[in-house]
Amino acid sequence: MSKSGIKQVAALCGVSPATVSRTLSNPDIVSEKTRDKVLKAVELCGYTPNRFGASLRTQKSGNIVVIIPDITNSVNAGIIRSIENAAAKVGYSVLLGDTQRDPEKVKHYAAMVRSGQVDGILLFSHQFPFDLKEDSSLLHHLPPMVNSCEPLALDNICKVMINNTAAAKMAVNHLLDLGHRRIGAITGNMDAPSSQERLAGYTQALQEAGIEFSVELVVDGNYQIESGKLGATKLLALHNRPTAIFCFSDNIAVGAYSALYEAKIEVPQQMSIVGFDDTEFSGYLNPPLTTVHQPLIEIGQQCMRLLLAQLNAKPISNKYVELPVQLIIRNSTAKISH
Amino acid sequence: MSKSGIKQVAALCGVSPATVSRTLSNPDIVSEKTRDKVLKAVELCGYTPNRFGASLRTQKSGNIVVIIPDITNSVNAGIIRSIENAAAKVGYSVLLGDTQRDPEKVKHYAAMVRSGQVDGILLFSHQFPFDLKEDSSLLHHLPPMVNSCEPLALDNICKVMINNTAAAKMAVNHLLDLGHRRIGAITGNMDAPSSQERLAGYTQALQEAGIEFSVELVVDGNYQIESGKLGATKLLALHNRPTAIFCFSDNIAVGAYSALYEAKIEVPQQMSIVGFDDTEFSGYLNPPLTTVHQPLIEIGQQCMRLLLAQLNAKPISNKYVELPVQLIIRNSTAKISH
DNA sequence: CTGAAAGCGCTTACAG
DNA sequence: CTGAAAGCGCTTACAG
């Protein structure tokens, strides 16, 4: 049974190719009688529509691309899983655009919308993904696209975000409430808006509490585990070490735990730790980590909802979606003791 | 500057569409003079070839699909990242087929090869992904495909595997060498070949050491963190508890650590733990985890190499690739003490 | 409700 | 080295 096309099916049941096409994509406009006939023939032939024919005609691929810095990061992985789910439900397939933070790869994947390889873009990066030289009209006629997690410096684009500043403030306020006054911070990549915003939240919380900002207490990280270990080690070496550390990601917290373990400093008795993300393992750390929960599933769903609206040229009432976060208090934070 | 096609470019530089096509996809067969002329026009128009036209003609999509149970699992994420890298280098894009272990989704993604949406399949599942009813010729004319991690019960298919049995034996032998005689195990999903093989390795190692197999020491897990916690809790409740636990994944080991922490049992002084995978965090656990290293990057590369050979109809000398694993000895295992 | 026809944008055998 | 032409497999306005 060699591969059959719409013509063979049509011939087999004595209708035109047009009718076969209609039966498959818009069954309601076909009479029940022909519909049955066609469907039977389709089954008999084992016919599967060839996507290329339809795509060439409709100029739609049925694919979307998600441009994301690193799929290995569990926050990203969680979001992608949610996107894949939501996309599958509405008949879209997702192309993986893992960029490894390479701006060239960001552009490469975004350009797929030009060649038709994808119909829309989910952008988890703050880098503008197009070459304006190539097509200067792009700024005003953006393709279907939604931006999440790391905001582009551009209005008029759909965004799904959390309020990083408020979230960080909430985390630091929790430590302040416990009596901590010297609070360290280990940041993410400081070129990322999320990390800048979290730092702003940290600073504001201290300021509002009337605590002077101390540079030495903020150490540069990059959201990865190793940077958390290095960062915590630096903070521990301070002549006047902090009593608590706000880690800008759970990964950083894992690294910090490791440094503290090696230095035989007990969490939370001698050092309180707060993380950010609430990744799956954070509740299984020893002690379980107090952290800011990010709604990964909802982020994915909202991204897909906004993208779908654009793909279907539906009006969008609210282009900026801000999702709530939550401080999950576990056992890595405690009242200051001295 | 509205979207221009190959015709506009051709018109602009006074050649035929055929020549434009040749210049772009096979520049060597075009004279230097025309080539320059064409390239200039291409740039001027901001022309990007439309993939649909080419695809319809060549019947190639330039996409592959990776069918994988859960992208959120860091072993899977690591492999996918490697695949994405290797694929990008040879001009393929990767479609994400996250199945959540749903056999229907496995089939859904595999069927994409029929509609032309993808040219090949990377299958990380032991489930045969096609409906033989739909197309019985499939068993003998398989599409380009390679199977990895969880072996299909089918010969004559390209496979990239590790030797799970030998790896598990190595892990258990390490514990035996340290003097442990009562060694517990927390398994993965027992419907997965990998977990069955690891269990076989565990059993063989004990047998060769002349130790009687004890059912109560083997508890069912599912590769997830929570199952590790539950499993370890069960093992601790035994009247004659083990002195060491072989966890079938690092995730399970994380769960076990959590249970041991809560029970105030020290690793490795009172309980040795071995994991499996060597995921990024395993070196940062407290204590750092002794575990079996899986070569994720190489797995991805070999998968892509074998798939590419099939996509290009190249002969494949060796359809079965077995990649070496390594026992990484860190601080979660110690000599038995009593 | 259905059919005949045009056409989406490429590539490639064929001829020169 | 280059062009004219056919055709990949669909969908959809148009006509009936």
Image (spheres, coloured by chain):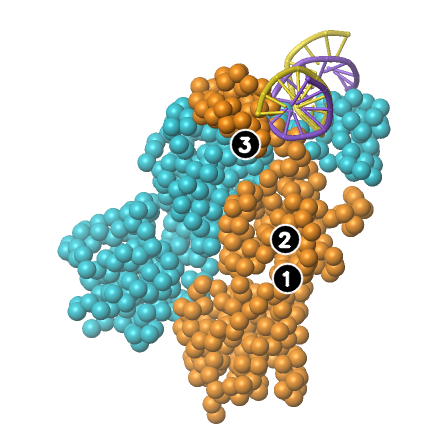
Chain colours: A orange, B cyan, C yellow, D purple
Nearer the observer, disc 3 or disc 2?
3
Q: Earlier in the sequence, mark 2 or mark 1?
A: 2
Image quadrant containing the C terminus of chain B? bottom left
Image quadrant containing the N terminus of chain B? top right
Tell me: B198 left or right of B19: left
* Residue A320, visible in the rendered structure: yes
* A143 lies above or below B215: above
Q: Residues within 10 Å of mark 1 (few under 14, many from 20)?
A: some
Tell me: A75 left or right of A138: left
Residue A306 is labelled as 2
For disc 3, the chain is A
Along the viewing direction, whichever of B316 and A327 lies nearer the viewer: A327
Per the model, the C-alpha gap separating discs 2 and 1 is 9 Å
Residue B211 image position (x, y, % from top left) = 16, 56
* Residue A47, visible in the rendered structure: no
Residue placed at 38% from the left, 69% from the top?
B287
The residue beneath circle 3 is A27
Residue placed at 44% from the left, 84% from the top?
A269
Q: Amino acid at mark 3?
A: Pro
Q: Earlier in the sequence, mark 3 or mark 1?
A: 3
Q: Amino acid at mark 2?
A: Leu
Residue placed at 76% from the left, 24% from the top?
B17
**Whether labels 2 and 1 share one chain:** yes
Q: SS class of the residue under badge 2?
A: helix
Q: Residues within 10 Å of mark 2 (few under 14, many from 20)?
A: many
